[in-house]
Amino acid sequence: MKNIGSTQKRILEFIKEFSASHAYPPTVRDIAGTLKLAVSTVHEHLAKLRERGLLRHEAGRSRGVWFSGKREAVELPVLGQIAAGRPILAVEDQKDWMPLPKDLAGSGNFVIQVKGDSMIEAGIHDGDHVVIRQQADARDGEIVAAMIDEEVTLKKFYKKKDHILLKAANPKYEDIRADNIKILGKLVSLIRKY
């Protein structure tokens, strides 16, 4: 990141952190609001970062700002499907391998295809693939792959005093209240094929 200003470095860092924690990139307004910049200023800096090849932009998309450049690729196992709706039977059956840039793939991660629309307001659609980092715990608001009995689902995690609450990102789905769940991992990236 040589020869870029401090504001552009802040913008790049924000895009990286936001994308990692939300599994989708920020909007220009997200960047402007968090970094206390004018929207027009953010647009100017994004244009300069694109010119330098540090970002790419998908025209016509509010969340179309992505990192670019050459990346080392690794392959992650694709372990079937996860419900973004009502939980489905857990079947850890490796279906395929998916090549991903190393910085998105991480280590110890796996890929699952999303089935359903309960996470649509979090930008996760039926048919998308999600990269899950294997871990047994989560913080409130994080999107997790969770097992209830022998079924798995993808939901937002909230720990309450006497139970766990799994919330959908679609108002047509009810929250799932559970006393005993197993967290399989946390969502770290989203892959959508167009």
Image (cartoon, grey):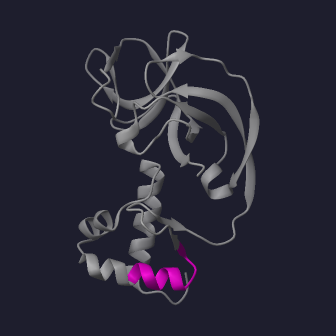
Measuring from the top left, give residue 107's x and y in whole percent: 67, 45
Q: Residue furthest top?
A: 149
Judging depth in this view, the residue of 33 and 64 nearest the camera is 64
Q: Residue 181: x and y, percent?
A: 45, 16
Against 21, is 130 above or below? above
Direction from residue 56 to residue 158 in the image, left or right: left
Say left or right for 160 vs 51: left
Q: Is residue 48 magenta?
A: yes
Q: Residue at x 34, y 41 (%)?
A: 121
| Residue 45 figure quarter | bottom left
Residue 65, horizontal then vertical, whole percent: 46, 66
| Residue 64 coordinates in the image, percent (x, y) | 45, 63
Residue 142 among those drawn in magenta: no
Q: Quadrant of the N terminus?
A: bottom right
Which secondary structure type mostly characterizes the magenta part of the structure? helix
Q: Is residue 37 left or right of residue 11?
A: left
Taking the spot 55% from the left edge, 86% from the top edge, the residue there is 2
Which range of residues does the magenta coloring cover? 45-55
Seen at 55% across and 85% down, the residue is: 52
